Amino acid sequence: MKSSVLPTETTMSLLIVDDNVHFVNRVTKLVQDIPHIGPIHIANTFDEANEMLNKEKPDLVLLDISLQGKNGIGILEGIVQSGKACKVIMVTNNTDEYYRQKCIDLGALYFLDKTYDFARIPEIISRLKSA
């Protein structure tokens, strides 16, 4: 049974940035029952992501590298350069060591493979929430 959020407890807002609607639906279902997560925002493009980052100021971003037109690494760079106080988890199929190292060097806390690490997302989010 899911416990209710007490008024004194804080929630962690989440932004999912991915252009794959199927993946977005899967990850939304996966995280929606994590205690103290909400609201959950969705961005499917580079521009939508930047708009949501400025408007909603999420606490946590699940970010894909491959987006139409531009890539998520540019979004990660923008987050770092702007000094936004949000945590970033890269969740991608582009798992080449070059991308992994670049994202970690830029400040991503985790670099997850969509195929093999998907089930780890709730545990990682819960850990970040309690940190």
Image (cartoon, rainbow, N blue to C red):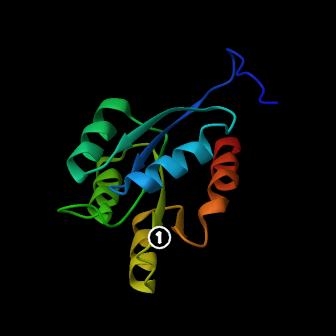
Q: Is residue 4 shown left or right of residue 104?
A: right
Counting the numbered discs, the total is 1
Secondary structure of residue under mark 1: helix
Classify the position of the N terminus by image quarter: top right
Picture quadrant where residue 42 is located: top left
Question: What residue appears at the point 37 percent right and 31 percent down from the top-left corner?
Answer: 56
Kind of residue indicated by mark 1: Ile
Residue lying at the far right in this picture: please name it.
1
Q: Residues within 10 Å of mark 1 (few under 14, many from 20)?
A: some
x%, y% of residue 68?
Answer: 22, 61
Which residue is disc 1 drawn over?
104
Residue lying at the far left in this picture: please name it.
69
Q: Is residue 15 above or below residue 101?
A: above
Q: Is residue 106 shown left or right of residue 89?
A: left
Question: What residue appears at the point 68 percent right and 23 percent down from the top-left corner?
Answer: 9
Question: What residue appears at the point 53 percent right and 51 percent down from the top-left corner?
Answer: 26
Residue 16 appears in view: yes
Residue 62 appears in view: no
x%, y% of residue 63?
Answer: 41, 57
x%, y% of residue 70?
Answer: 20, 63
